[in-house]
Image (cartoon, grey):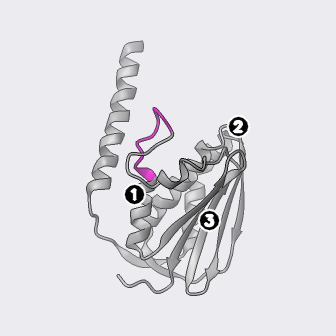
Amino acid sequence: KKDLKIIEQESMRAKEIVNQLLEFARKRSMNIGDVNLNVLLREVLQLASLQLKHSNISVEEELGEIPIIKADHNQLKQVFLNLVNNAIHAMPDGGRLIIRSGVMEDKVFAEVEDTGHGIPPDVLPRIFEPFFTTKKEKGTGLGLSISYRIIESHGGRIEVRSEVNKGTCFTVILPLNPSF
């Protein structure tokens, strides 16, 4: 039974890797509509709430007043869910997750900040590379590269700042009036 359990777990892990590879290779058409970024961020927090609670992570919301944007709701949800999951993994002993949003000039931004272990300076330039991972057995190295591609396809960008043993902050910047 023990061996069967291991086989089942590894099969599921292989399935997930294949699905991520397919997702990475596939050019999905975007389903553009009105998106309230604050509502989307709260949906992501709701999806991750059990994991956050079990990980002893407190959540702080600093959501500003932002206008509705044109975007693909599901693709943006995938990006922010990935960023939140990465933050959870960066805080195995608990910590704080801060979610911010706001407007800057003709753009909106959303930040996912954690008080985790941070990203070493030598690793930071590579985090958006496909198949680059620091998660050893648990990661495929596709989450951030897919997220980067999604945000780029929306005419936006992702910025990151990090300090070892202090935490990391990912900032997603999206145009108010994208040209799709």
Q: Which residue is mark 1?
A: 146
Q: Which mark is residue 111?
A: 3
The mark nearer the N terminus, 2 or 3, is 2
User: Is 119 left or right of 166, judged from the image as shown?
Assistant: left
Instruction: Reply above or below: 104 against 10.
Output: below
Please state, as top left, top right, bottom left or bottom right, where the C terminus lies in the image. bottom left
Which quadrant would residue 101 be assigned to in this image? bottom right
Whether pointer 3 and pointer 1 mark residues with C-beta atoms closer than 8 Å, the reply is no
Q: Residues within 10 Å of mark 1 (few under 14, many from 20)?
A: many
Amino acid marked by disc 3: Glu
Q: Which residue is mark 2?
A: 93
Amino acid marked by disc 1: Ile
Query: What residue range appears in magenta?
Result: 135-143
Amino acid marked by disc 2: Asp
Considering the numbered disc 3 on the image, is that residue within a helix, a strand or a loop?
Answer: strand
* Residue 34 picture location, percent across and down: 46, 80
- Give yes or no for residue 136 being in the magenta stretch: yes
Considering the numbered disc 2 on the image, is that residue within a helix, a strand or a loop?
Answer: loop
Q: Residue at x 70, y 37 (%)?
A: 93
Whether pointer 2 and pointer 3 mark residues with C-beta atoms closer than 8 Å, the reply is no
